[in-house]
Amino acid sequence: MDTRHLEAFRAVIETGSMSAAATLLAKSQPAISNLITRLEDELGVSLFERKKGRLQVTPEATLFYEEARRTLGVLERTRQVARDLKGLRSGTLSLASQPGLATYALPPIIARLLTRWPDGTVRFITRSSPTVRDLGRIEAFDIGFAEHPIESPASVIETIEVPCVCMVPADHPLAAEPVITPAHLDDAPFISLYADHFLHEAIERAFAEQSARLRMAVHVEFFGTACALVMEGVGVTIVDVVTSLHFQKVGLVARPFAPRLSYRYAMFQPAPRPLSRIAREFVESFREHNAALIREHSPYRD
């Protein structure tokens, strides 16, 4: 057994499939499968099973993952210290985030970070907020982004609040309105996050306060899906302003919504311990970039 077997095993656990692990590690899928098979042979247990075409983690794999993660973490930190001692700008950073941030907010920050860490490596896990929180409990990453609640022993670095806007097609009658209200959307087909999401609940309250009917067309899990449906003419939606920037480039129009609504999430550590140098730089870069992005593109100026 060597680090290649442990890295392949960790990647399969964290990505959920052999093919995704192969992509993450820049290897072929047969190579990953072979590494897992050799690891199972050495351990004498099955780590994964296929049920109805899906890869299932065995109880033995769950137990072994904790030790493999710790072993690789120690090795990666040891390598990082050695590189720091040599004065090299290198390091490893593991991130986990929900798809919206992973797609629309974090890539330019990671790109900027890697210009300062030319020998650095970033491992990126993209999952829903509940899954990111679950992965945090087993310390599967260095820094995560997820909606609250973030529970102990995880440590919140910062809570981010992003203003929301109403997204409509360019040819929609409301595209010319300076501000959109629930009264404008009375009985209009609406696309929103799931009914128990805090933003959807805030939208429901806003409509109720103005005696407007919120006519739900589609409930979705992610803002990107909502905007894609708006592009197809299914209805209108309310999303955070960062997500809106991408879809404004491809034809949608963003308008301020009154009352003002916000989307909140946390940047957090799975456990309260000192961050590595590359992680500290990432945190500062994220803060600067995100604040500038909101300051520049928020339609609310007061």
Image: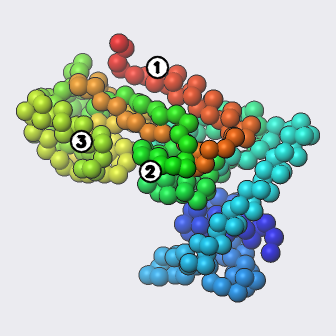
Residue beneath disc 3: 201
Q: Are marks 3 and 2 in contact (CB under 8 Å)?
A: no
Q: Amino acid at mark 1?
A: Arg
Give the distance between the C-alpha atoms of the residues marked 3 and 1, in whole angstroms.
26 Å
Q: Earlier in the sequence, mark 3 or mark 1?
A: 3
Give the distance between the C-alpha atoms of the residues marked 2 and 1, in whole angstroms.
25 Å
What residue is shown at x 52% (from left), y 34% (from top)? 158
Q: Earlier in the sequence, mark 3 or mark 2?
A: 2
Q: Earlier in the sequence, mark 2 or mark 1?
A: 2
Residue beneath disc 1: 295
Give coordinates of residue 38: x percent, y percent.
74, 81
Q: Residues within 10 Å of mark 1 (few under 14, many from 20)?
A: few
Residue beneath disc 2: 129
Question: In the displayed structure, would residue 132 be above or below residue 157?
Answer: below
Question: In the displayed structure, would residue 98 be above or below residue 33?
Answer: above
Q: Amino acid at mark 2?
A: Ser
Give the structural element (helix, strand or loop) at label 3: helix
